[in-house]
Image (cartoon, helix red, strand yellow):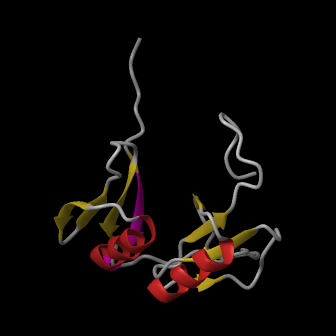
Amino acid sequence: MTRFALTGTVLDSPDPKGLALFYQRLLGWPLGSDEPEWVTLRPADGGAGLSFQHEPDHVPPVWPAGDGDPRMQLHLDIEVDDLAAAVRVAVAAGARVAEFQPQDDVRVCLDPAGHPFCLWVRENPVEGAAAHP
């Protein structure tokens, strides 16, 4: 059987290094590749990381999207210990808190390139439990 392994998620940005440094501040992961058009972050445990590719014509998605708006293709879910503190850290690093918040226990933020990501806290940690609802 052919093996498949997800090695990362790629985000487009007019400034891949700047976006990588933003996520590095949030996640604490070291830079891997650091080229003008391609930058990577990889966790120390060897899990799937994030990559950032240069896209000079990047159009940020609109959250939530209306008719004719550029739609998000994906979003990142980031588990945190303290939601309010995590939002403060994200904003200090360059994120914006989205105006529309669909859940009280999750904060949708937009990274410097406009990609949505969700900060959330697991209420009752249970081994093997599903991630963010």
Residue at the image point whose x is 53% and y is 78% from the top: 114
| Residue 22 point in image, percent of width and height | 40, 76
Query: Which contiguous range is marked in magenta?
Result: 9-15
Q: Is residue 11 magenta?
A: yes
Q: Is residue 75 magenta?
A: no
Q: Main secondary structure of the magenta part?
A: strand
Viewer-proximal residue among 130 and 1: 130
Q: Quadrant of residue 41?
A: bottom left
Furthest-top residue in view?
1
| Residue 47 point in image, percent of width and height | 39, 43
Q: Does residue 92 appear to the left or right of 82 in the view shown?
A: left
Furthest-left residue in view?
35
Residue at the image point whose x is 41% and y is 28% from the top: 4
Assign the N terminus to one quadrant of the image: top left
Q: Does residue 41 appear to the left or right of 86 in the view shown?
A: left
Q: Quadrant of residue 83?
A: bottom right
Q: Quadrant of residue 65?
A: bottom right
